[in-house]
Image (cartoon, grey):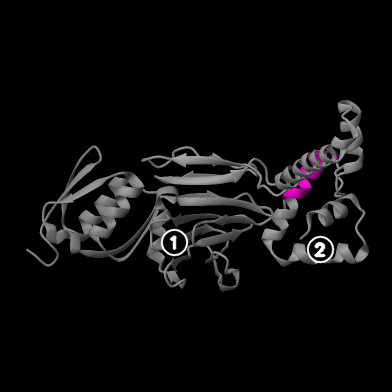
Amino acid sequence: MDYADLIDYLNGHATAAKRRAIEAWLEASPDNRREFQRVQRLWEASGKAMEPAAPDVDAAWEKVSRRTRRPARWMPILARAAAAVVFLLAGYFMWSLIQPAPLLEARQGGQAAQEAVLLPDGSKVWLNPMSVLQFPESFDGEERLVRLSGRAYFEVARDEARPFIIETDAAAVRVLGTSFGLMAYPDSSTAWVQVNSGKVAFYPKGAEGQQLVLAKGEGAELDKRSGSLQRLGPQAANRIAGRTKKLVFQNASLEEAAKALKEVYGAELTFENPNLANCRFTASFDREPLEAVLQTMEALFAIKWQRDGQAVLVKGAGCGEG
């Protein structure tokens, strides 16, 4: 879309046909709407007085000629120089119109964040290790767009009029207000989302028509190579147990349980008998302390455990052994 037409539209000078064309262009894609919003922000910051007309080269020359008092033979050269300067300034100004609004950035190092990143709309984001979140200083447009590289847990403030969109390298999530976990490390072959409350739409980036709508307790995974989406089973809820403190084990091995306990409680389980790691069980826990989980395992498998800080040594015979 021609930027001069956009300025005419904002100033109220566009014809009815041009207004309809611009409004159709705005409806065509989110990228078009974001581009228009960048122009609109600069138009508002300028006092709504920007005009799209070409620079007045004659007026620019008059100013130059009055100051220089050069002989007449230099006038054409100076006129061209003045026109070039004005043209360059106008070009720089129009270039500045199309630059994206500056983004704020939150980075997380080797440990999971204890404090949430607070976004301009009141949404909260907890970043996992080696993750980066980019977001604007304010959500001024029709959408609340952020970008994630890594893994995070989101609690999104509800806003029916402005959907919240998270873009990653290969996947995107669209919500109105909900809580969920999202993993999309650039070097991972997959990306996944797991919903804790509300609903989310999960889809390959740029392919919103292929979306899966997921409700509380549901999750999905994207294969980046094939672009295919797959729904996850109930046990995938353990992927966000670090925030929810809810664990679900369905025919899970003690080895799988040990990984989940490390993420939720920071506990390091060691099996004195390696065969114990293959023992399977079904159970669920809702915000229960680590000791309650270990006691359940003790009752199911006739094991003993010793805890020293975050280190837990599990002793006993393997499954089916005397």
Q: Is residue 109 in view from this perspective? A: yes
- Residue 168 position, x and y percent, is 51, 56
Q: Image quarter for residue 317?
A: bottom left
Residue 23 got which mark?
A: 2
- Residue 120 position, x and y percent, is 64, 42
| Viewer-side residue, 268 vs 23 | 23
Q: Residue at x 24, y 56 (%)?
A: 297
Q: Read off the magenta span.
A: 38-47
- Label 2: element kind: helix
Amino acid marked by disc 2? Glu
Q: Image quarter for residue 55?
A: top right
- Crowd class of label 1 (few under 14; some 14 to 19; many from 20; radius 10 Å): many
Would you place residue 275 above or below residue 37 in this image?
Answer: below
Q: Is residue 19 left or right of residue 239?
A: right
Whether residue 46 is in magenta: the answer is yes
Q: Is residue 22 left or right of residue 98?
A: right
Q: Residue at x 33, y 45 (%)?
A: 265
